[in-house]
Amino acid sequence: MAGLHKSEFANPVINWIDTRLPIFTMMQKEYGVFPTPKNFNYLWNFGALALVILMIMIATGIFLAMNYQPNTDLAFNSVQHIMRDVNFGWLIRYAHQNGASMFFIVTYVHIFRGLYYGSYKTPRELLWMLGVVILILMMATAFMGYVLPWGQMSYWGATVITNLFSAFPVVGPKIVTLLWGGFSVDQPTLNRFFALHYLLPFVLVGVIFLHVAALHITGSNNPLGIDVKSPQDTLPFHPYYTVKDSVGVCAFMAFFACFIFFFPNLLGDPNNFIPANPLSTPADIVPEWYFLPYYAILRSVPNKLLGVCMMFGSLIVLFVLPWLDTSRVRSARFRPVYKWLIWVWVAAFVVLGICGAHKPEGIWVILSRIATLYYFAHFLVVLPILGKLERPLPLPESISQPVLGRRSGGGPLPGAAPAKPMEKA
Amino acid sequence: MADSSAAAHHPASGDVTKRDLLQLIALSGAAIAAGAIAWPLIDSMNPSKDVLALSSVEVDLTPIAEGQGIVVSWQGKPIFVRHRTAAEIKEAQDVKLSDLLDPHDGADKERVKAGHDQWLVVVGICTHLGCIPLGNKPSDPRGEYGGWFCPCHGSQYDTSGRVRHGPAPLNLALPPYAFESDTKIKVG
């Protein structure tokens, strides 16, 4: 049995399994001893947090699906049935509904961490691009999920967004008919959205697997943005980061619980308590908060096709970010100009979000145009130029060096002395 | 100070350390949280309130003449409600327990409510393989014992719903019911 893996576990049952399928060895390597930079701050919790939220969404979603009816005559009432009659149905529904918002908050913070600390730069370009794929899949899933309760906003949001595709010349209307399965958003649309909404999270799990695998090849970035130089710069993932992630999960659960139990409908739209009426459009059609910035970009220009292209473009530009940013320095900590400009970009994104919530008239049009302009200019103009012009601050020699001092800091100097525990006064 | 930080990592084997206690607390906390999350999900699979609301049904007995029987749906099952004649009641009471295929709940007195001997309420599902026996309509065959006849495999039941001819092994089941008045029962 030459090819068999030699397992090192003492427990005979685990050893037997591990010899034949080395999952325990793999877990030990990837999550047990995996050398992780020791200087993570709490922004590094958000990836693990996103995974926890995904698990919650899948679990609550499966149990909701046991009672949901994907039929235009029954859907709205089936959701009320869940809320009123199914044991803990209200809890499962609110957890799923607010979990979607949580998922986006956590993911946006996770992306911000990537932008601020240059985690998209070489050799992590593919990791970053997989992340953008994850974001897009999340958006598709969330969009379809919102249609399922078949309220007024569900129906009209679906109508507006599916109609976007008619902007494309020649094939546009045919695409829309294909999406609808009919001549408007109706039963075929609802049914297929339900099937796809159930499917995509599992596709998401697959892409996340690739995302984490890619991360484990390159290793994590860290707040200083410099590479790990020696094992001294790292800590084993367990117990240091398993415990730190647990703290983060607890804090997050408290935040999540506030929404579920105290303000379950704060982030929702009251129009969705009205059953869908294809013959009456609500006065304001607004998507969920996490789509507002993209909605604002869509409506920032009067031309339909251009608006659609810009909206999709705002996501596609993220794919090429690793090549747009020419700076050799990863972390914004050592980039004095970028450090401020990234916050300007965040401000533009937030302003876009606020604009998205308002009708496109008066001041909101002007604001959304300025903010859209900066959104794209940041990536397409500012970053390529800034990398060449900016004078970065001097980088430390290694992760350990700023803490442990020159002598025991490790780094490129040969024969560096082994680390000594920090001496207390 | 530097010494103690190194020494604390390796307690003598057998000693329970503070670390062990903390690990136990953390693990227990995680287990309790997992249970608290799992229970609502699993309980959501139990019958919902609307299903439970349909779990009892009221039957008005006034339209049922003597010698007639009706079928009522309760929790998805058929319930036979028969208004027995005096002859049928006597026949049922006279049978010896030792003659029955299934004597354990065979005493007729135990199969009806006291003071309401004329009303027989049984679950109309043959205890063999689950067919619905015939005998409620006047045109139905009732078998040799005057009760019900199952067309699937020939089981026969008497006027107290007891199995008298197989292949059914058990008497017709008795649902929980009570008299709300002389003319109304509530099943379930």
Image (cartoon, coloured by chain):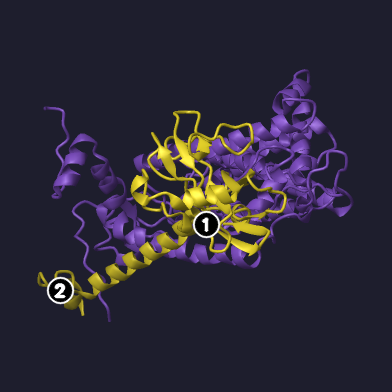
Residue placed under numbered mark 2 in the picture: B7
Residue B74 relative to residue B95: left or right: right
Circles 2 and 1: CB atoms closer than 8 Å: no
Circle 2 crowding by C-alpha within 10 Å: few under 14, some 14–19, many from 20: few
Between residues A298 and A52, which one lies in front from this camera angle?
A52
Residue lying farthest to the top in this orientation: A170
Could you say which quadrant of the image residue A242 lies in? bottom left
Query: Looking at numbered disc 1 in the image, what kind of residue is underneath it?
Result: Val
In the rendering, at what x and y percent does residue A68 appear?
Answer: 62, 44
Residue placed under numbered mark 1 in the picture: B112
Quarter of the N terminus of chain A within the rendering: top left
Q: Colour of chain B?
A: yellow
Judge whether A68 appears above or below A94 on screen.
Answer: above
> Which secondary structure lies at badge 2?
helix
In the rendering, at what x and y percent does residue B67 appear?
Answer: 63, 45
In the rendering, at what x and y percent does residue B180 appear?
Answer: 64, 64
Chain identifier for the purple-coloured part of the image: A
Which chain's residue wears label 1?
Answer: B
Circle 1 crowding by C-alpha within 10 Å: few under 14, some 14–19, many from 20: some
Judge whether B110 appears above or below A203 on screen.
Answer: below
Query: Looking at numbered disc 2 in the image, what kind of residue is underneath it?
Result: Ala
> Which secondary structure lies at badge 1?
loop
Residue A138 relative to residue B154: left or right: right
Between residues A376 and B145, which one lies in front from this camera angle?
B145
Residue A59 relative to residue A266: left or right: left
